[in-house]
Amino acid sequence: MKVLFIGGTGTISTACTALAAARGIELYLLNRGQRQVDLPPGVQVLKGDINEDRAGAAALLAKHTFDVVVDWIAFRVGQVERDIELFGGRTGQFIFISSASAYQKPITHHRITEATPLANPFWQYSRDKIACEDRLMQEYRQNGFPMTVVRPSHTYGPASLPTAVGGGATVVSRIRAGKKVIVHGDGESLWVMTHNTDFAKAFVGLLGHPKSIGHAFQITSDEVLTWNQIYASIGRACGAVPQMVHVPSDLIHHFDPATGAGLLGDKACSVVFDNSKVRELVPDYVATVPFARGVEQCITWLDAEPARLQVDAQKDAMLERIIAAYERAWG
C-alpha cells in the first residue's frame, strides 16, 4: 500500500508514521522538512510547502498516485478544496484529520459518538474543522470523492505534555517551584487523554480500509480522568504536589481569550468517548498507555535537556494575573 502523509512529523502523526513504516507501508511525507525528527528507514520525504507553494507541491506529486492520502495540516475549507483538486481521481482514500472539539457545545450528553451533532459557538478552530468536514462530505455525496474523517481528542506524546492552562514546561516549572497552577472549573469535569502511540494503532488500521469511506471515526483512549486527577498525575511525575487554584473558565477567557476559547469550546466540558465504531473496523484496537505512565515519559523528555524546561514568560505572567484577579474576587 502506497500512502502519502501531508505533514507527518507532528505530535500525533509522528507515531502514525512510525507504525505505518513498521507495518511495511510504502510511506511518503510531504512537508517543509523543518522539524528535526528521526524518520524510520524507508520513509521517503517530498520536501515542499503545500500551503505556500501549491504549484511546487503539485509538481512533486505529479508522478505519483496513492492508495491513501492523509492531510494532517488542513484547518480551513480552502485547504480541503485544494486537496480535492489535487487528489480527486488520484487516490483510493483521502483522510481528513478533524477534531473531537467539533462536537456540540454545550454538550447535551456526556457520552459522545460519531453521531453526536457538530456545533461549537465558542471556538473558531472547531468551526473551521466542521466546515471542512461539511465540504468533504458534500464532495463525497456529489462526486464520490473517497473521504474519511478522523476526529482525535486530546492526544499527546513524550514531547508534548498535555495541560489545559499555561503550557507544559511552564506548568511543570511552577509545580516544582511551589507556585500555584490553574485548573479550570472545580477540576471535577471528566476528560480523556490519548497517547499518540495508542491513537496510531487504530488510525493505521483505517488506512485503505474500504468500509471507512464516507464515514467519520473518533479515536481516543477509554481512560476517563478528572482534571484534578490529571494535574495530580503531572505532580507525581515531576516530584511535587501541585498547588491547584480552581478558576472559572469564563474568568480565564476574560484574561486570555485564546486559552478560554479552547476551554469553553472543549476542555471545560465533561466528555466520554465511545470507540465502538472504530473497533468495528479495527477490532484489536486497545489503548494501553495509561496517563500516569504517559506523563512520566513527558517529564523524562523535558528533563533530558534543560532548554526544554524554559518557562514561557508571557504565559507565566498571564497565570499570575488570572490567579491574582481570582483571589482578589474572594477578598
Image (cartoon, helix red, strand yellow):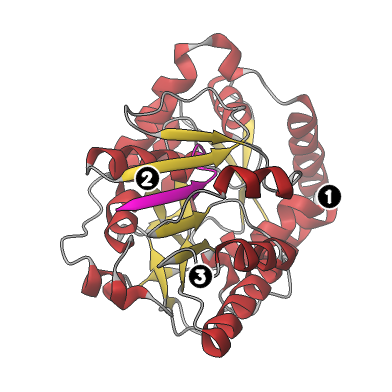
Residue type pointed to by label 3: Gly
- Give the residue number, with chain letter if any, for mark 3: 89
> Would you name the residue on which mark 1 appears?
255
- Give the labeled residue for mark 2: 16
Q: Residues within 10 Å of mark 2 (few under 14, many from 20)?
A: many
> Could you say whether the residue bearing mark 1 is in a helix, strand or loop?
helix
The question of residue 7 being in magenta is answered with yes
Indicate the amino acid at tag 2.
Cys
- 1 vs 3, front mark: 3
Q: Which of 154 and 125 is in front in this view?
A: 125
Q: Could you say which is closer to the camera, residue 71 or residue 151?
A: 71
Magenta segment range? 1-10
Q: In this view, does 154 lie to the left or right of 15?
A: right
Badge 2 marks a residue whose secondary structure is: helix
- Residue 139, image x, y percentages: 59, 81
Q: Position of residue 221 (x, y in %)?
A: 33, 57
Does residue 229 sit above or below 271 in this rendering?
above
In this orientation, which residue lies closer to the viewer: 303 or 54?
Answer: 54
Whichever of labels 1 and 2 marks the residue nearer the N terminus, that label is: 2
Q: Which residue lies furthest to the left in this view?
A: 284
Which of the 4 quarters of the picture holds residue 24? top left
